[in-house]
Image (cartoon, coloured by chain):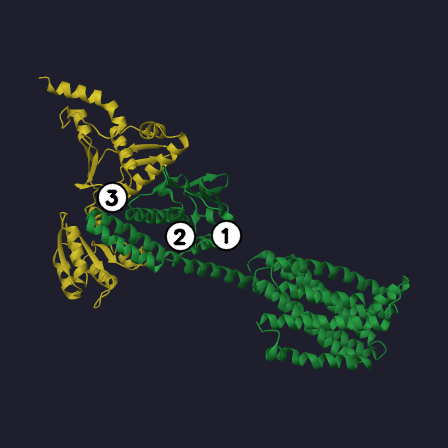
Chain colours: A green, B yellow
């Protein structure tokens, strides 16, 4: 967020790092290498640099692969790309010289092929990822649309390499990889996963691709040619990095704002979607019950109608707010349980053990748990059966408990909890960061405990 | 108290009539005929207007504004099915608005508005002799649980003294285990509070683990008997409630005294 200093600061830092990186890679590296007499051919010193990059890429690779198992397949693509780059550097001509110095001789042709292939693999990884992002299947005509232009590009690359002009295409591919990495970061941010790893991965990929492009300039005879060409490439490199970095920095900032908005909207719609969750059959059953009650006793009908209409009103219009005072939610629960009890021949004992109410909860977030207890706990079938709704303060938290001494259930055998409960749990987690704990024992009852941190949103009354 | 009721639907007016007939209210019903309403309100001393909002020929909120132009001290109550609140009202009518009757509304809610207009609190009448019962403006109060009713009875028997949680538990839940008793106590307090709030009665001071009754606006046969020695005491006091036995000796003594010439 723009008003968030931390975010702005980070973007600024990133821009500065990017500028320095671009400066070093675009101008300083070629100049330094030339002055050290290292340019133009594979070199052990550059090999060390490459191997360091290999180490770092390996780290990224491991992190991304591990998280791919945990998070989703978008990180799988990053792993794929960093894997490609990892192999490319490991078998680079410079690394070979370094290995040769240590007595490990590798076939330059094999290494060259592996390295270049890995580079292509990284590029393809990016391609694949973009396809994935836009939801295209990896086959058929849609794949051709994106693979189509890339394939001749790659063939051109290999052809040109024989003539020593590969750097032209190389440069294009580098640009492509960088833009792909940007897309990946963009993706990660829209999913609210901006973290250290994202920045680390991005920075490393930028640096490594930049290093490769700078190095490529030397291989492909840049230094051997006119100084003018060197400068031209340095300038190109420079002008490429600055906008890319700026774009990334600004982009990540904008995205942060957008993702915050997005999150808020998601919360809002989530609330809306589920608050309207009064089922039609509930309404019709209730109307039927009201009719019966009116026939039996006018006062009973009046009372039940009043509870029902208050409950319906509360539920239909509850999506107007994300959080409501706990007392409002208790009113909803009360209207619900009172109405339900009017319908029952065997009244259920619902005890409101309310000791603390100075906090907020999402509307209709406690009611589903009570509804569930009313429907499934079977407390009406046992002696002294009751449902207790408690709220109290414990340290810096408000605790809400819904417990019953009913039949209980085997948690491991419950495949899908009801829509209402799932949604209530999600909203507690999403809005208040509170995870309802459910404990149940067969024959002893069920207890749901929700601990709400009073320092957070829930504590603002 | 004179009120005007406006609704375009005959049924709605009929419902209102059914509910308000028990109260001492002079009422005049109108359909959504703006000119006739304005004319009536300007010529008569009307205390309050109860109006629907969405009506075919005139919007209740617009009409309310015009009515205030005619009669600035008019109270307004909106009868509506819409989720409208005071925040949605314009500056001009907010100050005059007493509240909203959301359809379907209860007789209690309507009575609450009548009391607000008259600026009075409902009169509670408590009957302790024989069985305990409570009436608000003559209507039997339905408590939301038997224990909350019993708790209120005990509070009345305490006659203005503070009732602590321990004392209440000792009387009402003597056999229950301490933890369960506390829960039951809080539940009864919660329910009692709900019942009284719905009646618009504010006679109990709810403090932490302590309750106290404000005797103003309550009349009770037991209190009168204690003061005057005259009453309908026939040896039965809050029958059904175990703790009431302790009160009997004192009551008997007073009754004895009353009999002596």
Query: Which residue lies most toward the left here?
Result: B261
Residue A203 position in % (x across, y down): 69, 63
Q: Image height check: is B202 above or below B239?
A: below
Residue B203 position in % (x across, y down): 26, 37
State yes or no: discs 3 and 2 in contact (Cβ < 8 Å).
no
Q: Secondary structure at mark 3?
A: helix
Image point (29%, 54%), residue name: A309
Question: Which of the 4 image quadrants contains residue A191?
Answer: bottom right
Nearer the observer, A104 or B58 = A104
Measured in 3D between alpha carbons, the distance from the residue under mark 3 to the one under mark 1, in whole angstroms, is 38 Å
Q: Using the image, tell me which numbered label, if any, was put on residue B199.
A: 3
Q: Secondary structure at mark 1?
A: helix
Image point (71%, 80%), residue name: A153
- Residue under pointer 2: A364
Q: Image height check: is B131 above or below A354?
A: above
Q: Is residue A19 visible?
A: no
Q: Secondary structure at mark 2?
A: loop
Return the chain for callout 2.
A
């Amino acid at each position: 967020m723009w008003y968030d200093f931390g975010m702005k600061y980070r973007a600024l830092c990133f821009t500065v790092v990017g500028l320095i990186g671009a400066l070093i890679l675009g101008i300083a590296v070629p100049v330094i290498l030339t002055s050290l007499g290292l340019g133009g051919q594979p070199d052990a010193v550059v090999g060390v640099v490459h191997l360091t990059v290999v180490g770092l890429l390996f780290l990224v690779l491991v992190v991304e692969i591990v998280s791919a198992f945990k998070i989703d397949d978008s990180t799988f693509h990053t792993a794929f790309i960093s894997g490609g780059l990892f192999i490319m550097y490991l078998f680079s001509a410079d690394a070979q010289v370094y290995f040769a110095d240590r007595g490990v001789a590798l076939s330059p042709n094999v290494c060259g092929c592996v390295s270049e292939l890995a580079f292509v693999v990284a590029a393809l990884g990016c391609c694949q990822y973009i396809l994935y992002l836009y939801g295209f299947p990896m086959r058929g005509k849609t794949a051709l649309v994106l693979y189509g232009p890339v394939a001749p590009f790659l063939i051109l690359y290999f052809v040109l390499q024989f003539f020593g002009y590969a750097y032209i295409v190389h440069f294009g591919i580098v640009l492509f990889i960088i833009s792909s990495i940007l897309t990946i970061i963009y993706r990660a941010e829209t999913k609210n996963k901006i973290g250290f790893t994202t920045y680390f991965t991005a920075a490393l990929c930028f640096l490594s691709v930049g290093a490769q492009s700078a190095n490529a300039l030397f291989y492909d005879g840049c230094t051997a040619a006119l100084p003018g060409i060197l400068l031209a490439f340095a300038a190109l490199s420079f002008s490429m990095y600055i906008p890319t970095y700026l774009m990334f920095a600004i982009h990540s900032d904008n995205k942060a704002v957008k993702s915050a908005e997005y999150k808020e909207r998601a919360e809002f719609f989530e609330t809306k979607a589920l608050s309207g969750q009064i089922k039609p059959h509930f309404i019709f059953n209730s109307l039927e019950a009201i009719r019966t009650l009116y026939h039996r006793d006018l006062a009973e009908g009046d009372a039940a109608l009043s509870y029902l209409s208050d409950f319906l009103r509360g539920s239909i219009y509850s999506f107007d707010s994300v959080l409501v005072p706990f007392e409002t939610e208790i009113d909803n629960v009360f209207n619900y349980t009172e109405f339900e009890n009017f319908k029952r021949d065997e009244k259920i004992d619902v005890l409101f053990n309310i000791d603390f109410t100075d906090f907020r909860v999402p509307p209709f977030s406690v009611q589903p748990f009570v509804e569930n207890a009313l429907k499934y706990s079977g407390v009406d079938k046992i002696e002294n059966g009751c449902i207790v709704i408690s709220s109290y303060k414990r340290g810096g938290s408000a605790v809400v408990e819904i417990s019953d001494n009913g039949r209980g259930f085997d948690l491991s055998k419950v495949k899908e909890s009801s829509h209402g409960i799932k949604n209530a749990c999600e909203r507690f987690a999403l809005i208040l960061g509170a995870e309802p704990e459910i404990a149940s024992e067969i024959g002893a009852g069920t207890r749901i405990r929700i601990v709400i941190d009073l320092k957070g949103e829930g504590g603002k009354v | 108290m004179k009120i005007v009721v406006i609704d375009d639907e005959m049924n709605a007016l009929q419902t209102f009539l059914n509910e308000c007939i028990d109260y001492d209210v002079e009422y005049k019903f109108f359909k959504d005929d703006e000119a006739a309403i304005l004319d009536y309100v300007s010529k008569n001393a009307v205390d309050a207007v109860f109006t629907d909002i969405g009506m075919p020929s005139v919007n209740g909120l617009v009409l309310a504004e015009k009515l205030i132009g005619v009669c600035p001290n008019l109270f307004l109550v909106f009868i509506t099915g819409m989720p409208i609140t005071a925040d949605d009202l314009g500056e001009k009518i907010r100050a005059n608005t007493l509240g909203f009757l959301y359809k379907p509304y209860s007789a209690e809610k309507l009575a609450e508005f009548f009391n607000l207009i008259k600026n009075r609190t409902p009169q509670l009448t408590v009957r302790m002799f024989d069985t305990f019962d409570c009436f608000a403006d003559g209507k039997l109060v339905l408590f939301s649980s038997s224990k909350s009713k019993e708790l209120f009875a005990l509070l009345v028997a305490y006659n203005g003294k503070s009732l602590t949680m321990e004392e209440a538990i000792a009387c009402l839940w003597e056999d229950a285990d301490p933890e369960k008793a506390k829960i039951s106590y809080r539940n009864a307090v919660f329910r009692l509070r709900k019942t009284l709030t719905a009646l618009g009665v504010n006679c109990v001071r709810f403090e932490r683990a302590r309750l106290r009754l404000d005797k103003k606006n309550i009349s009770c046969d037991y209190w009168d008997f204690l003061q005057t020695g005259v009453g309908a005491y026939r040896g039965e006091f809050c029958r059904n409630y175990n703790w009431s036995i302790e009160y009997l000796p004192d009551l008997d003594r007073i009754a004895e005294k009353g009999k002596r010439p």
